[in-house]
Amino acid sequence: MILLDRWFEGMTRGLARRSGRRSFLARLGLGLVGGAAVPLLPVARAAQDPARAGAAPENIDGPAGDPQDCEYWRYCAIDGLLCSCCGGSHTSCPPGTEMAPVTWVGTCRNPADGKDYIISYNDCCGKTFCGRCFCNRNEGERPAYHWYRNNDINWCYGTKSQIYHCSVAVVLGVAVEGQPEK
Amino acid sequence: MRAELRRLLLAVWCVSLIGAPAVAEVSPRHDYVLHCSGCHRADGTGAPDDIPSLIGIDRFLRSPEGRAYLIRAPGVAQAPVSDERLAALMNWVVVEFGADAPSPGYTAVEVGVWRARPLRDPTELRARLLASDAPSDEPR
């Protein structure tokens, strides 16, 4: 602490000897105002807005990058059958099924960039249980009384048929923060 | 002297950054997508018979009871965000899916009061509020 104290004293005394107060105050003021303004600049803010967010990086090696594997990064809270094993993909329903517009929404971290993304687990409905690639990860899932973060209930709302077939995981955008239940 | 001054200014600048909000600003649209859109959908239309539509939501602001209802409704009151963020979210929702902004806008204090008073029967209250409104342009 004494060394730190001496270093600060030396620096400020030296500065006082060699500079005028007015110029110092002018520069100090500039630094304060400039520093305070930096967080207000619109730098990269657009990327945080889900409506303007770009696609999530998918260049991931191993199971976390495979949409037909339960460990695929988007499936962190999934409880169901992967549409990518049932004739559809991780973002589209198999033929003959209808994607439910009402969904379970949460966040998953993408290992490619370390960011959280908002994920929508839409169920595909209208055909009987697909029966392939059952996954049950449930990260951030909550009991049935916390309905909008529960994946045990049938999410075939808003569709012609309430028969569950499989689930997809659609990226809705970048999450500024992970869902609070994690 | 210039090098020392630069160092001092750099230190001041760093301190001013620490004073700035540590958490990135969260937009109401972000909170809507994460906490509301799963049920009410991105376009606010919901699902007939299951999830109420938000289109024309500003009509609830015509009465004090309706204004409180929009905050006391279960999905709103229980949304996992602070009173400040919920107030910003609802001010955004009303404009996004309605016509007129709340006047005055919701504040964190008002939101905190209403969300602490759960509704025993939100469906009944919603029906009553809509029945007392103009029948010609009710939201679905």
Image (cartoon, rainbow, N blue to C red):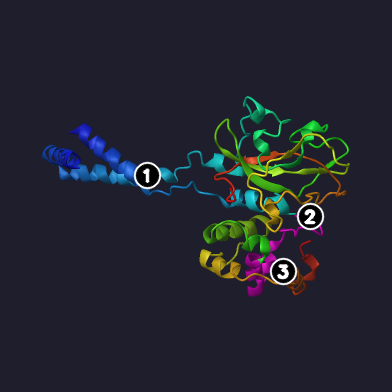
Element under disc 3: helix
Sequence-first tag of 1 and 3: 1
To which residue does mark 1 refer? B17
| Nearer to me, A85 or A37 | A85
Q: Position of residue A117 (x, y in %)?
A: 61, 40
Q: Amino acid at mark 3?
A: Pro
Q: Position of residue B64 (x, y in %)?
A: 63, 74
Up-down relation of residue B99 to residue A136 (above or below): below
Q: Which of the 4 quarters of the picture holds residue A13?
A: top left
Q: Amino acid at mark 2?
A: Ala
Which disc number belongs to residue B122? 3
Element under disc 1: helix
Up-down relation of residue A40 to residue B89 (above or below): above
* Letter of the chain that mark 1 sits on in the rendering: B
Look at the image and give the residue range highlighted in magenta: B46-72
Sequence-first tag of 2 and 1: 1
To which residue does mark 2 refer? B47
Q: Residue at x 81, y 37 (%)?
A: A93
B27 displayed left or right of A12: right
Residue B64 sits inside the magenta stretch: yes
Q: Which of the 4 quarters of the picture holds residue B93?
A: bottom right
Q: Position of residue B63 (x, y in %)?
A: 66, 73
Local packing at callout 2 (Cα closer than 10 Å; few below 14, some 14-19, many 20+) is: some
* Viewer-nearest of discs 1 and 3: 3
* Letter of the chain that mark 2 sits on in the rendering: B
Q: Are marks 1 and 3 in contact (CB under 8 Å)?
A: no
Quarter that holds the N terminus of chain A:
top left
Q: Amino acid at mark 1?
A: Leu
* Viewer-nearest of discs 2 and 3: 3
